[in-house]
Image (tube, grey):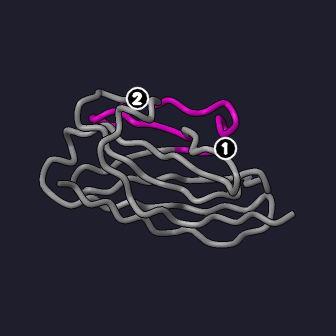
Amino acid sequence: QVQLVESGGGSVQAGGSLRLSCVASGSAFSTYAMGWFRQAPGKEREFVATVSRTNINTIYAESVKGRFTISKVNAKNTLYLQMNSLKPEDTAVYYCAAAPRSYYSSRFDDYDYWGQGTQVTVSS
């Protein structure tokens, strides 16, 4: 069982930046594809970004491409999401997730482990 703990959320004005972190338990973090998802009030959870096991390959949702950067530091068991040029529509609870069976993936069903989420609020 893998435990994921997110941090770094908060409130920021439009145009600002935040960096989310996600620390994973255990010794197999380097073998996991990792991803960030988000869920806004009244909406379904949606894919934001994924990074491959080796931190070489990434995929981003079109809505965040060019503004967000995902990365993982295997030596620290930590996943990051650098969010720049934030918009009010980025307001959501952000979740990190681990996909042990995938190289990297944007598919919700490929992720077996989820964090508890961290709130990001962007005001206009």
Crowdedness near tag 2: few (<14), some (14–19) or many (≥20) residues, C-alpha within 10 Å = many
Residue 12 in the figure: left or right of residue 78: right
Q: Does residue 38 lie above or below 6 as drawn?
A: above
User: What span is in magenta?
Assistant: 48-69
| Residue at which label 1 appears | 67
Gap between marks 1 and 2, in whole Å? 20 Å
**Residue 66, placed above or below residue 88:** above
Q: Residue at x 17, y 54 (%)?
A: 1
Characterize the local packing of mark 1: few (<14), some (14-19) or many (20 or more) Cα atoms within 10 angstroms: few
User: What residue do we see at 58% from left, 40% from top?
Assistant: 46
**Secondary element at tag 2:** loop
**Residue corresponding to mark 2:** 105
Answer left or right for 57 relative to 11. left
Residue at image coords 81%, 66%: 123
Residue 106: assigned label: none
Spot occupied by residue 119 in the image (x, y as percentages of width and height): 59, 66
Residue 29: x and y in percent read 21, 48
Q: Quadrant of the C terminus?
A: bottom right
